[in-house]
């Protein structure tokens, strides 16, 4: 009860301050709902780990009031009209509100239809497991890798360099390989022979002698194994369509003027 009385007393002080400190025009009246105050106090409790005292409640509400006052003054000065960040944030907010109106409960028919129409999206790429010896550009990679390859297949000793991403790679797609090695390195894996050392291949960092021990061919998965992702993608697809429909419907109410003589 004391807690509620404190809140009521504080609200009274704030409203009195607003009523006496600001003029009585509508755009100068600030109304703070009970829910807004309770929400702020609960957020404060979550962060601090205890209930706020009376002074802390007053500061919480006063901060809210001052933020609202500064916001309104900024609007009066037109500070929102040329600020790209504010425009983008407001556009994102209305987009979010429109998207959130889409229910996320789908029938099996809808899910299966979406999966069938977007099967390529869920294709599991071919994966490779391999090891390699690395020879850096900074240390005569071409000649050293060729000599080392000859030594390797003839069981002769040789020295390689340390590769910053390691020596062994497991279940790597061609895109993963390209991301790590660059220079179209992954193209050499298309028809690569398994369980044999391969003559030096050039990457963005030097030359590599590689040994591919496993290849798992790509495949289309059953819907059961990707069901959660399909549901997420279906929901996003519906939300994207909803916001596009909303924009298309209201766009006809706007006229856009662009300088036809602008040279870019």
Image (tube, rainbow, N blue to C red):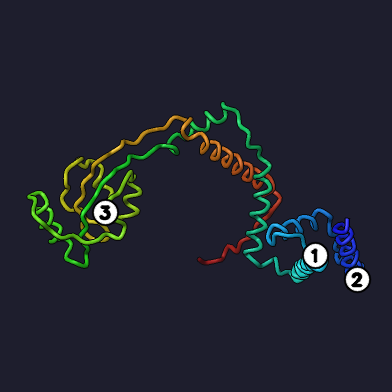
Location of residue 108 with respect to 229 vertically, above or below: above
Residue 72 can be seen in this image: no
Q: Which mark is residue 141?
A: none
Q: Nearer the viewer, mark 3 or mark 2?
A: 3
Tell me the distance, in whole angstroms, between the alpha carbons under discs 1 and 2.
31 Å
Furthest residue toward top: 109
Q: Tell me residue 20's x, y (percent).
A: 92, 71
Is residue 86 left or right of 155 when viewed as pictured? right
- What quarter of the picture does the N terminus occupy? bottom right
Q: Nearer the viewer, mark 1 or mark 3?
A: 1
Is residue 215 left or right of 51 when viewed as pictured? left
Looking at the image, which residue is at 69% across and 53% down? Answer: 254
Looking at the image, which residue is at 21% across and 49% down? Answer: 210
Residue 52 can be seen in this image: yes
Q: Tell me residue 169's x, y (percent).
A: 30, 49
Determine whether label 1 and label 3 are within 8 Å by CB. no
Q: Residues within 10 Å of mark 1 (few under 14, many from 20)?
A: few
**Where does label 3 land, which residue?**
167
**Where does label 2 land, which residue?**
23
Q: Which mark is residue 53?
A: 1
């Amino acid at each position: 009860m004391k807690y509620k009385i404190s809140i009521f007393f504080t609200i009274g002080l704030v409203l009195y301050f607003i009523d006496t400190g600001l003029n009585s025009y509508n755009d100068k009246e600030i109304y703070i709902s009970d829910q807004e105050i309770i929400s702020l106090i609960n957020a404060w409790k979550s962060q601090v780990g205890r209930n706020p005292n009376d002074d802390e409640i007053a500061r919480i509400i006063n901060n809210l009031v001052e933020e609202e006052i500064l916001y309104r003054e900024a609007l009066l000065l037109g500070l929102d009209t040329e600020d790209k960040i504010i425009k983008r944030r407001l556009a994102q907010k209305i987009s979010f509100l429109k998207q959130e109106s889409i229910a996320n409960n789908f029938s099996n028919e809808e899910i299966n239809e979406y999966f069938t129409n977007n099967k390529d999206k869920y294709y599991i790429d071919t994966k490779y497991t391999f090891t390699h010896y690395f020879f850096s550009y900074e240390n005569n990679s071409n000649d050293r890798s060729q000599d080392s390859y000859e030594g390797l297949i003839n069981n002769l000793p040789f020295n390689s360099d340390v590769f910053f991403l390691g020596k062994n790679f497991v279940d790597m797609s061609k895109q993963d390989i390209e991301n790590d090695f660059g220079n179209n390195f992954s193209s050499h894996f298309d028809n690569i022979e398994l369980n044999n050392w391969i003559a030096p291949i050039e990457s963005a960092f030097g030359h590599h002698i590689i040994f591919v021990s496993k290849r798992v061919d790509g495949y289309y998965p059953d819907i059961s194994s990707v069901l959660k992702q399909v549901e997420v993608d279906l929901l996003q697809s519906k939300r994207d369509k909803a916001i596009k429909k909303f924009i298309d419907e209201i766009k006809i109410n706007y006229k856009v003027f662009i300088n036809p003589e602008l040279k870019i």
